[in-house]
Image (cartoon, coloured by chain):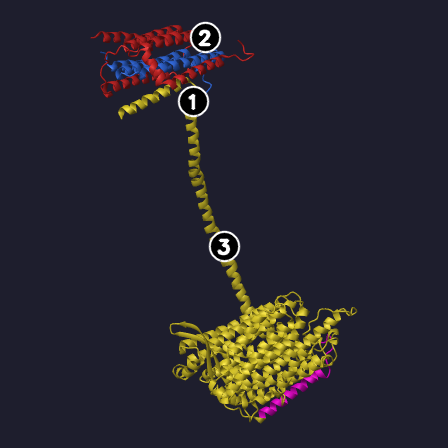
């Protein structure tokens, strides 16, 4: 096809609805048609649907490269009431296509990984039938996330926002009735509920912001709002501040910032592909996307910007400290995710939208890699447990948590591929030159050093801690001696798992090219959508200092964990060093306990009060029983006794008595005497004669 | 005052008197005899009314056969005076009252409601003679005549059956 | 000339007397005789009307009445005799077993 044909015909732009439709078709086929087919069919079909979305996204990216201005593709009319017109339309611009590529690209790799992972997991948990459900939910998630990033209005964004919240719930609580080891437990469904409730609070903030926007601007569409925003900001900046801060509440919910981050660590209860896709690479970045999209609003209110940046930075530091004290391999990664999201939120809060989006992309690569590799490690541990359970009767193997790092150790011998890719991911996350994480994190640090020093110092400390806890993790898991029998018998994962890991590792290594200082590819790309970007300058001081800090942190972690590795049953050496500080980290500052005491228990008390006192004692016992039921009984008694028995029965009995008495009386006529009969005959004659005479 | 009227009056008195006598007599035989006299007086009435055949059959059948039969049975069963009535004391006065009412009604009917019919004219010589009765009987009323004969047969059989004694019954 | 109404009046009186006898007397035989009296009273009326209308149908009817009366008396007296065998009495007040 001729280039001109494509641009003028706009051919590929019209394909954009397919990024949603392909996953929907995939999930429908998997729901209804693949009932008796093998796991391979189900898994590859879902992956194919995701890949098809990716292909469309690539085509859209290509189309945008030729025609970079935003294109709106309407799909359906939705609500038309009076002046209100809310429709479903797709918006294809550089920002949304970036998100689409990340979601579908990383998503497809994770789908493929999940084919192998879930194959083993359903066998470990002993429920083969649930395999299909997983892929249906995963496709549903891709569809919902695509709606989120491709909508042309805050309304469609919110539809997708809610959709991914639902999928998060469904997937966290995938094994809803059992725990990690397959024992009966409600832990997973509790975690799912926690995620949903925390997100709900965030959604509430988002909705208030949406209502304010509709009230102020009369529309929810991006174009219209961003057009009118400057005038409104002139007239009453307060409303824009309110809108942006309420949106921030939504961001703290979905992207797990302070104070609503508490659901993310619990969400690790879901299968590892879920943690990788939703809680690392894609869903949690929706908040960052939201702020980036709303750049036009945020740049008008610097006060709000500072709040956002501060929240992000504080979260980054706070979560990093907690990560240092965690023992579960996925929990470390979870807090790491919260911390890295803090980086992104701080970036877009400051106005460094490119830096934020860049880190979003690179983080998707290496965090997905890390989570999937952690999943590989866990699977390896489970395989080791399986091996021991069969055959080796001399080793009495107790139930063991396959995710606890204290049970691991020396796994690089048993799982070499996993080890190398994990190392790559850890170095990328730590921000070591020249991996992807270095470039993106560095850009954020550079920008923050220009704008907000407080934010800069918090982020730097966070970077130090990040490198430290990743080093700790590497040494604890892969080096030293195996601390348990299970670890000794751990096995490497099959190709269907390791191949996606290798692909992601490659992306983590070379991902930095997306926005190398000087080339600024991503900046130029995003400039078409967000008008407030400037190319970030490369700050050598910042770059050097952050690299040195990272290496220092890794060295420190080697000192603590690598030189003298932990042995079985030994306490964490850092605990001895830091004492009570480590305990605070280990117990995550008792935030969950605090929330429970202040909010949840109070709510339960209120609910109990309403249920028992108001509903049972007052409504049921008093109103129903004493007032209604007893009065009704009284009425019934009244109707029964005086009326029914007294009156109606009297009529019935009286009728019977009357009949009896009259028959008794009339019977006496039959006295057997002929004379009286004859008399009656004569009487009759006389009467008839008399009648005839009178007539 | 013609002879007919005087004769009628005398005979009427006799008829009524004998009827009353039959009614009030305590002896059954006297009642039967009073009734015979009554029948006789009625026979004379028939004669006066130009029905000689009927008059004489009245005497022979009624007074001669029926009353004789009555007397036989009275003799058989005894003409004893019955004990005074012990039940239905109210019945006798009421019956008398009703009879009185009946007479009043009949009287009223006759006096005020009957169409004038006219007097009795002298009959022809053969009016009511056996020949005439017979010819009417065997021509017009043949069927009833035959049925009546069967009726009489039935009566005979009935009378015999009713008085037949079963074996072992006391005589 | 004796008007027909005189005969009818007489017939009515005799009939009433007969009816009275049926009602008042307790002796079964007397009651039966009163019935005969009533029949005769009716016969008298028939014959009177025969004379009025100058056709003999009334007399034929009287003939039949007489015949039937004879048959009736035969059967009736047989009945009374049969009852006497059972009840040893001809008082109709004794024959009240149909009471109830």
- A512, above or below A410, in the image: below
Q: Nearer the viewer, residue B12 or A628?
A: B12
Residue A649: where, in percent of width, then height?
A: 44, 37
Q: Residues within 10 Å of mark 2 (few under 14, many from 20)?
A: some
Give the chain coloured red. B
The residue sitting at the left extreme is: B1
Residue A307 location, x and y as percent? 50, 81
Q: Which chain's residue wears label 2? A: B
Q: Numbered disc 1: what chain?
A: A
Q: Which residues are magenta?
A: A541-570
Colour of chain C as rendered: blue
- Residue A586 position, x and y percent, is 64, 76
Label 1 secondary element: loop
Identify the hue of chain A.
yellow
Of pointers 3 and 1, the one earlier in the residue sequence: 3
Q: Main secondary structure of the magenta part?
A: helix
Mark 2 and mark 3: Cα distance apart in space: 94 Å
Circle 3: element type: helix
Above/below status of A533 relative to C33 = below
Tell me where residue A2 appears, x and y as whole percent: 51, 89
Residue B77 bears which disc, if any?
A: 2
| A559 is within the stretch colored magenta | yes
Q: What is the distance, in whole Å, between disc 2 and disc 1 at their CAs?
A: 28 Å
Q: Choose mark 2 or mark 3, whichever is in front.
A: 2
- Please name the residue that numbered disc 1 is placed on: A670
| Residue that numbered label 3 is attached to | A620
Q: Can the viewer see residue A594 in this picture? A: no
Q: Is residue B97 above or below residue A59?
A: above
């Amino acid at each position: 096809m001729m280039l001109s044909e494509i641009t003028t015909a706009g051919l590929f732009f019209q394909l954009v609805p397919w990024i949603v439709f392909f996953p929907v078709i995939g999930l429908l086929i998997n729901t209804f048609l693949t009932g008796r087919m093998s796991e391979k069919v189900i898994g590859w079909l879902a992956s194919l649907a995701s890949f098809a979305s990716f292909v469309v996204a690539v085509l859209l990216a290509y189309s945008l490269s030729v025609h970079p201005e935003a294109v709106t593709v309407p799909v359906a009319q939705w609500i038309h009431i009076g002046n209100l017109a809310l429709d479903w339309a797709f918006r294809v611009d550089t920002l949304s296509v970036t998100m689409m590529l990340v979601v579908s690209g990383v998503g497809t790799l994770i789908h493929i990984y999940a084919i192998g992972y879930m194959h083993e997991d359903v066998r470990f948990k002993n429920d083969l039938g649930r395999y299909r459900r997983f892929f249906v939910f995963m496709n549903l998630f891709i569809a919902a996330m695509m709606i989120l990033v491709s909508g042309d209005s805050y309304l469609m964004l919110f539809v997708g926002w809610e959709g991914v919240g639902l999928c998060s719930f469904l997937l966290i609580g995938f094994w809803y009735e059992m725990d990690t080891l397959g024992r009966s437990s409600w832990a997973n469904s509790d975690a799912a509920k926690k995620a949903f409730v925390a997100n709900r609070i965030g959604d509430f903030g988002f909705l208030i912001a949406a209502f304010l926007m509709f009230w102020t601007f009369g529309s929810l569409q991006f174009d219209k709002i961003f057009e009118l925003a400057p005038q409104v900001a002139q007239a009453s900046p307060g409303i824009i501040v309110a809108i942006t801060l309420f949106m921030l509440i939504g961001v703290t919910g979905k992207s797990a910032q302070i104070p609503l981050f508490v659901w993310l660590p619990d969400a690790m209860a879901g299968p590892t592909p879920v943690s990788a896709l939703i809680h690392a690479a894609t869903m949690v970045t929706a908040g960052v996307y939201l702020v980036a999209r709303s750049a036009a609003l945020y740049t008008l209110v610097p006060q709000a910007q500072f709040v956002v940046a501060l929240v992000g930075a504080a979260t980054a530091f706070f979560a990093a400290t907690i990560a240092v004290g965690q023992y579960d391999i996925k929990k470390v990664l979870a807090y790491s995710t919260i911390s890295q999201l803090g980086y992104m939120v701080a970036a877009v809060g400051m106005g460094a939208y490119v830096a934020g989006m860049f880190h979003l992309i690179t983080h998707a690569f290496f965090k997905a890699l890390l989570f999937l590799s952690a999943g590989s490690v866990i699977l390896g541990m489970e395989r080791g447990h399986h091996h021991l359970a069969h055959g080796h009767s001399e080793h009495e193997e107790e139930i063991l948590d396959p995710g606890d790092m204290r049970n691991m150790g020396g796994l690089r011998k048993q799982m070499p591929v996993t080890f190398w890719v994990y190392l790559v991911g850890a170095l990328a996350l730590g921000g070591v030159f020249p991996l992807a994480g270095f470039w993106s994190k560095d850009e954020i640090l550079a920008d923050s050093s220009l704008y907000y020093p407080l934010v800069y110092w918090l982020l730097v400390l966070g970077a130090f801690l990040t490198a430290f806890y990743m080093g700790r993790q590497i040494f604890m898991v892969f080096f030293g001696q195996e601390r348990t029998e299970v670890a000794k018998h751990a096995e490497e994962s099959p190709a269907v798992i390791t191949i996606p890991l290798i692909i992601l590792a490659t992306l983590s290594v070379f991902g930095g090219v997306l926005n190398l200082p000087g080339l600024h590819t991503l900046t130029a790309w995003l400039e078409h959508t967000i008008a407030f970007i400037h190319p970030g300058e490369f700050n050598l001081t910042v770059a050097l200092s952050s690299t040195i800090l990272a290496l220092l942190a890794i060295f420190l972690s080697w000192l603590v964990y690598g030189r003298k590795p932990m042995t079985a049953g030994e306490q964490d050496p850092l605990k001895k060093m830091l004492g009570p500080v480590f305990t605070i980290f280990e117990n995550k500052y008792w935030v969950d306990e605090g929330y429970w005491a202040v909010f949840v228990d109070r709510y339960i008390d209120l609910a109990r009060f309403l249920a028992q006192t108001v509903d049972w004692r007052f409504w049921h016992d008093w109103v129903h029983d004493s007032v209604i039921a007893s009065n009704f009984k009284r009425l019934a008694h009244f109707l029964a006794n005086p009326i029914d028995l007294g009156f109606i029965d009297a009529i019935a009995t009286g009728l019977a008595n009357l009949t009896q008495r009259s028959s008794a009386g009339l019977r006496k006529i039959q006295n057997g005497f002929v004379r009286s009969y004859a008399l009656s005959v004569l009487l009759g004659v006389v009467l008839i004669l008399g009648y005839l005479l009178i007539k | 005052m013609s002879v007919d009227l005087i004769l009628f009056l005398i005979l009427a008195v006799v008829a009524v008197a004998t009827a009353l006598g039959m009614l009030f007599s305590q002896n059954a035989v006297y009642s039967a005899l009073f009734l015979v006299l009554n029948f006789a007086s009625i026979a004379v009435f028939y004669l006066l009314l130009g029905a000689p055949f009927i008059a004489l059959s009245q005497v022979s059948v009624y007074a001669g056969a029926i009353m004789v039969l009555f007397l036989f049975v009275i003799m058989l069963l005894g003409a004893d005076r019955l004990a005074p009535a012990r039940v239905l004391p109210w019945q006798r006065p009421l019956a008398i009252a009703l009879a009185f009412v009946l007479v009043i009604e009949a009287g009223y009917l006759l006096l005020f409601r009957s169409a004038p019919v006219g007097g009795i004219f002298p009959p022809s010589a053969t009016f009511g003679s056996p020949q005439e009765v017979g010819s009417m009987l065997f021509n017009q009323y043949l069927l009833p005549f035959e049925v009546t004969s069967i009726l009489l047969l039935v009566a005979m059989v009935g009378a015999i059956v009713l008085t037949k004694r079963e074996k072992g019954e006391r005589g | 000339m004796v008007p027909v109404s005189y005969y009818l009046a007489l017939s009515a009186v005799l009939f009433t007397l007969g009816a009275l006898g049926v009602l008042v007397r307790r002796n079964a035989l007397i009651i039966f005789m009163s019935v005969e009296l009533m029949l005769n009273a009716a016969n008298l009326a028939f014959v009177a009307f025969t004379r009025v209308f100058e056709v003999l149908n009334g007399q034929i009817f009287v003939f039949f009445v007489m015949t039937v009366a004879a048959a009736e008396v035969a059967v009736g007296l047989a009945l009374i005799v049969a009852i006497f065998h059972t009840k040893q009495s001809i008082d109709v007040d004794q024959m009240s077993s149909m009471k109830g």
